[in-house]
Amino acid sequence: MNLQCNIDLASAYKSASQVARILSEDWCARELYCPACRSGSISRSPANTQAADFSCPRCEQRFQLKSLRRWGSPKIVDAGYEAMIRAIKADRAPHLLLLQYTGAWHVRNLMLIPRMFVTESVIEKRRPLSKTARRAGWIGCNILLGGIPEDGRIAMISEGRPTPEQRVRKEFERIRGLGKLPPSLRGWTVDVLSFVRRLRKAEFTLSEIYDAEPSLRIVHPNNRNIRPKIRQQLQILRDLGLVEFKGRGRYVLRASAGPN
């Protein structure tokens, strides 16, 4: 994989954001493979395609690219809040590709966030644009990366080193089952998995997960049966092979390939 962007393409643009978009999109079209299947490439989406920059010609998975100069931000600026919420509820949110480039236009980091982890809980509503703005009143959103468990942050390139394709696809396959859940249920499942991950323990108890009740009540204010819902989600995570039930309220977290 060649991590150098084609700098010659930047000569026709003056805006730094335009240059970043042109060079990173060109790099993805030339160098990137599909993490969800065996396709060795992804294709640019037709012009004006909403919320998707690329799609796989084989499995038709859709991807949205976010190009970043800085890495490690706790949140990513995205488009309209209402449009994003509608896409999540309709199960139309694309997979996210977060790409960091260097000053010399090398790809330094590339992270895949599978669409299953883009839930309502990680979408933050921004303040409306001021009355003097060209799009006065428009409300955008941020994607809160801190709310996404490590299972949903798959490193494709880390510090200039590409992750083997086989490993990336194995990690994607591991969480693919989440995509079969309806969005309304999936949000709960991901929220519980995120709390389990934050325990930083290979083995945990049901009582420890009950400690998440106040936090879950905030993001799911219409549900008055939080503990039964937690037990339901742990059963789903067990059925998906992400946790193992050991009996007497004890669970073991199935390991991923490691923090990304």
Image (tube, rainbow, N blue to C red):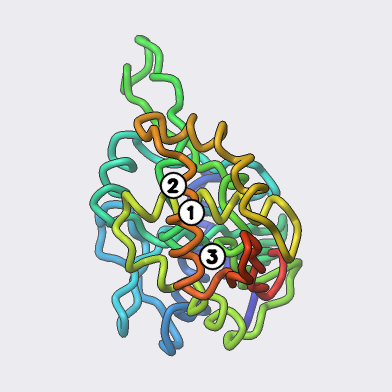
Residue bearing the label numbered 1? 231
Residue bearing the label numbered 2? 228
120, above or below 231, in the image:
above
Q: Quadrant of the N terminus?
A: bottom right
192, above or below 211, in the image:
below
Q: Is residue 2 visible?
A: yes
Whichever of callouts 3 and 2 sits on the residue coming sooner in the sequence is 3
Give SS at disc 3: strand
* Residue sitting nearer the eye, 25 or 223: 223
- At horizontal 51% and vertical 59% (from top left) the residue drawn is 234
- Residue 134 percent location from the top left of the image: 33, 20
Residue bearing the label numbered 3? 112
Whichever of callouts 1 and 3 sits on the residue coming sooner in the sequence is 3
Number of marks drawn = 3
- At horizontal 49% and vertical 65% (from top left) the residue drawn is 237
Q: Amino acid at mark 2?
A: Pro
Distance from Cα at disc 1 to Cα at disc 2: 5 Å
Q: Is residue 4 visible?
A: no
Q: Quadrant of the C terminus?
A: bottom right
* Residue sitting nearer the eye, 33 or 24: 33
**Mark 1 surroundings: few (<14), some (14-19) or many (≥20) residues within 10 A:** some
- Residue 220 percent location from the top left of the image: 42, 35
**Mark 3 surroundings: few (<14), some (14-19) or many (≥20) residues within 10 A:** many
Give SS at disc 2: helix
Distance from Cα at disc 1 to Cα at disc 3: 29 Å
- Residue 254 percent location from the top left of the image: 64, 73
